[in-house]
Structures are given as C-alpha cells and as structure tokens.
C-alpha cells in the first residue's frame, strides 16, 4: 500500500548531496512530492526536507540514506500523523482558547493530551472541550518542588511537545533539561525593554508604535531560545494601553498558532540558537 513520509536531513555540507539523496528515492521508485533545501554557509551545514510517496520501509529508507551522506548526518523518516501535545497555562485565556477552538474545529493537526495550570481559573473553559485539566498549585512550594509535581504528571503521558500557552512561571534548568527542544513558548515583543508587571502600560507610556510576538523553543536563557515564528502589528497614538494589550494578545495567538503548525508538520530544524524553517 502506497504511503507518504517526511524525510528530514541535516549534516555537514558537501557536493552532490541532493543528487545522492534523490537517487535513494529514485532507486526505490519513490515520488518526491515536495522538496526544500538550505545551506548555512557560515557553518557549512546542509538542511533538507522532502515529502516522498510510494512503497517503502521506514527503517530501510533511513539506513539507505545514511549510507550515502556524511557520518554526522541526522536523518528522520516520519510518517505523517497527529502529534501529541500538552498545554500549560496560568490565567490568561487567549492563547489557550485559540488552540482549543482550532482543535475542536479540526484545524490543529495534533491530539491534546491535557492542560496543566498552576491556577484553576481556566478549568471551566478547558472542560468544555472534554480535555483533561490538572491544577497543580504552586503556593507554599519551592519552584523545583512544584516542577517535580508537574513533571510527574507530564510523564504519565506520551507526548511530542509541551506548549506554554501563557504559562507565567519561569522554568528551572531541571524542567528545561528534561524536555529539551520539546517546549514551545510565546511572549510579547517588549522584552527586554519593558520587564515586569503590565508591559503594555509601560509601552503605552513610552509611545510604542509596533507590537509583536515571538514563539520559540525554551532554553535556560530566558526567552532567548531558537525562534520559530514572529510577527508585528502597528499601533498608533489613538490606542490606550488596554487597546494595545488586546492587539498584543491577538498577535500572540496568531504567532503561536503559526509556530505550532510549523512544528507539527516537521518544518523546523534547530540550528544552534537559530532555526531553519521550511
């Protein structure tokens, strides 16, 4: 039975890679439905994403590709299926609600395993979508102790990514290290200019004219992990700070949704502290 796969390859660059990889596909009578490649010339690294269709064995195809490309190559042959995600939130509903609606409408190529929050504010919203909600309060607990409770819960599920849908707690190296390159965050564009409480009011008082958002992988460098998606919208002197806040929440929803779509369709390669996005 014919099937499809996404083939993701990154390795040291050298001449003839596209030919060698394409020949592996040709020799197995596979059709290349889509193909994109990129070379980071500064570090001489090659990236390629191909969508192929035909009759193949995942392990045999992966082994055949590794035989013709550099030894340092990372090769992934992925048969498309809905990935599993865990959502984490605190009190703000806009990012979480947008994901839940897309999920309910069949627009999110993922299965939501559960929602975890350090507050119970969003429980009623989540229950409407028949998704498990877990309240793990942090009051009276050291940060690491609270995270151990959260991690124990997370590890009961099989999942591909953890999505921080405005989860307003700084994660420790303990947590980040346990789920490396599996945590996706969204934040407004005012960092590091406007730090702390009510950044939109700070931005209003400064006369900011552009509001944006950044979705990125989480690392131990706060809000500085590899960027997946960004966007901006213009604001004017007519905006009060609450108008700016509403506009900022809108762009956060858009950017997080875009980043999720890219990650769930295997279009993102981490390249040091950057990404290659096809």
Image (tube, helix red, strand yellow):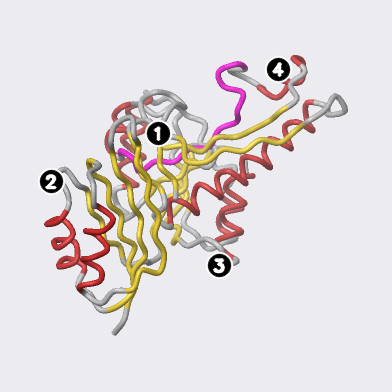
| Image marks 1 and 4: residues in contact by CB distance under 8 Å | no
The reply to whether the C-beta atoms of the residues labelled 3 and 1 are less than 8 Å apart is no
In the picture shown, does residue 173 fall above or below 257? above
Mark 2 or mark 4: which comes first in sequence? 2
Mark 1 lies on a secondary structure that is: strand
Q: In the rendered structure, which segment of residues is drawn in magenta?
A: 180-193
Between the residue at mark 2 and the residue at mark 1, the CA separation in whole angstroms equals: 23 Å
Residue occupying image coordinates x 59% and y 42%: 121
> Mark 3 to mark 1: distance in Å?
30 Å
Mark 3 or mark 1: name the one nearer the start of the chain.
3
Residue 139 in percent (x, y) is at 46, 28
Determine which residue is flagged by label 4. Answer: 202
| Nearer-the-camera pick, 220 or 5 | 5
Q: Using the image as rendered, state which of residue 163 and residue 89 is in the foreground.
A: 163
Q: Which mark is residue 71?
A: 2
Instruction: Name the residue at 32% across, 41% down.
Output: 151
Residue drawn at (23%, 53%) of the image: 75
Q: Give the mark, 2 or 1, whose residue is nearer the N terminus.
A: 2
Secondary structure found at label 3: loop
Q: Quadrant of residue 49?
A: bottom left
Q: Quadrant of residue 204?
A: top right
Task: Specify whether 94 is left or right of 56.
Answer: right
Picture disc at residue 106? 3
How far apart marks 1 and 4 lie (CA) works out to: 29 Å
Q: Which residue is mark 1?
A: 274
Quadrant assignment for the N terminus: bottom left
């Amino acid at each position: 039975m014919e099937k499809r796969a996404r083939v993701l390859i990154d390795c040291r660059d050298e001449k003839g890679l596209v030919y060698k990889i394409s020949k592996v596909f040709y020799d197995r009578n596979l059709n290349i439905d889509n193909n994109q490649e990129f070379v980071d010339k500064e570090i001489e690294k090659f990236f390629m994403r191909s969508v192929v269709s035909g009759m193949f064995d995942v392990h045999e195809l992966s082994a055949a590709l590794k035989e013709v490309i550099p030894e340092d190559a990372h090769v992934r042959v992925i048969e498309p299926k809905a990935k599993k995600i865990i959502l984490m939130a605190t009190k703000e509903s806009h990012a979480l609600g947008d994901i839940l609606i897309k999920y309910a409408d069949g627009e999110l190529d993922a299965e939501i395993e559960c929602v975890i929050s350090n507050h119970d504010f969003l429980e009623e919203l989540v229950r409407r979508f028949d998704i498990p909600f877990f309240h793990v309060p942090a009051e009276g607990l050291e940060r690491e102790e609270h995270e151990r409770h959260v991690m124990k819960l997370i590890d009961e599920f099989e999942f591909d990514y953890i999505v921080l849908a405005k989860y307003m707690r700084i994660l420790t190296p303990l947590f980040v290290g346990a789920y490396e390159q599996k945590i996706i965050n969204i934040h407004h564009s005012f960092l590091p200019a406007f730090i702390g409480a009510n950044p939109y009011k700070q931005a209003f008082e400064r006369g900011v004219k552009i509001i944006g958002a950044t979705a990125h992988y989480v690392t131990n460098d706060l809000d500085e992990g590899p960027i997946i998606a960004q966007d901006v919208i213009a604001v004017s002197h007519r905006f009060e700070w609450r108008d700016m806040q509403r506009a900022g929440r809108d762009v956060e929803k858009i950017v997080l949704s875009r980043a999720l779509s890219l990650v769930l369709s295997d279009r993102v390669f981490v390249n040091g502290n950057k990404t290659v996005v096809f």
